[in-house]
Amino acid sequence: MGLPPPPAAPVVGAPALQASSVRRAFGSMVAVADASLSLAPGSVTALVGPNGSGKTTLLLMLAGLLAPDAGEVRVHGMTYGQHGPDARRHVGWMPDTFGTWDSLTCLEVLTTFGAAYRVPPEVARERALGLLETVHLAEYTGAPARVLSRGQKQRLGLARALIHAPGVLLLDEPASGLDPRSRVDLRRLVRSLADAGVAVLVSSHVLVELEEMVDDAVFLNRGQTVAGAPAPAVARWRITTLDAAALLAWAATVRLPLTPDPDEPPGSPGAGTFLVHLPDETHAAALLRDTVTAGIPVSRMAPAGGRLEQTYLAMETERR
């Protein structure tokens, strides 16, 4: 198989991927009402929203697998309607559940997808072997895909999305089913791809993990992207003390409202964890200083969730 014809030349300075006011409905059900986003080369962007907000439908449109009813998607300045195969060759897509042909070996799964992208067989094989090493599946190179666990199939799905060396990578719940070590490896791989110039969009409900790998975030609610979606001006902090009574008594004297943390498991007798709303880290540092100066035995103080989580919780979201 020879090399495919060169793709149409990208527009200089264009985003790696851009969606403008895309809409998609299934009968009377509007899955995506009005979504816009732009991904820069070398960036990792989170796609965040509640269940039923339209994230997977949006990702399918971004991958060129579902045509929008309105709006358009551009990949390096190209549209799927005008440049179909050329635009799709720039995009790697990893769905939340990766279906495999159970009779094919892991190597055959990757080389088959390489052929679908018109990657020459010798190049596809070399890439496949390297990717199986990268996702720690080299020992399963010649094994049928049916022997893989759920998490291993996820890793194979990630390798499949990268077989044609795309410049844009779309990941839908990529950490689903992965063990802790594999989750760390995933974060490192995503950051290394971004460092190499790949634009990555990651959809996940595990906001703590997203916080560690992304540069930006797009929030989707009721089928619409939320413009700006800034972090809340007042953030929640969690403060833990070995003497809850002393902390509460001191807080009453300085009129500091504290709320018991409902998510904190019971600790030692007399201890307690509380939530407090503070404008910024400067106020948090001052609170820690004042409690220690007052002789309160504070054992831990930290934000109650990252910026993504707090921004998400501050939004008026609706589950469908």
Image (cartoon, helix red, strand yellow):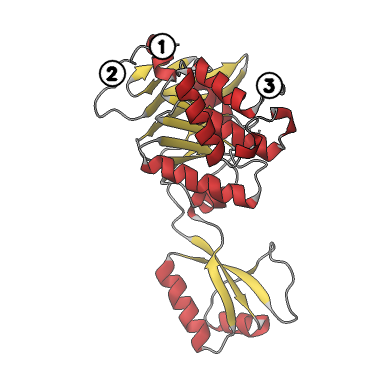
Q: Looking at numbered disc 1 in the image, what kind of residue is underneath it?
A: Gly
What is the distance, in whole Å, between disc 2 and disc 3 at their CAs? 35 Å
Residue 241 lies, in percent from the top left, at 62, 79
Q: Report the side of 38 relative to 69 (left or right).
A: left
Question: Which residue is at the front of the view, 87 or 317?
Answer: 87
Q: Which residue is mark 1?
A: 2
Q: Which residue is mark 2?
A: 9
**Dot 2: element:** loop
**Dot 3: element:** loop
- Camera-near label (3 vs 1) is 1
Of the numbered discs 2 and 3, the one sitting upstream in the chain is 2
Question: Which residue is at the front of the view, 133 or 248?
Answer: 133
Q: Looking at numbered disc 2 in the image, what kind of residue is underneath it?
A: Ala
Q: Report the side of 158 relative to 284 (left or right).
A: right
Of the numbered discs 3 and 1, the one sitting upstream in the chain is 1
Q: Which residue is mark 3?
A: 101
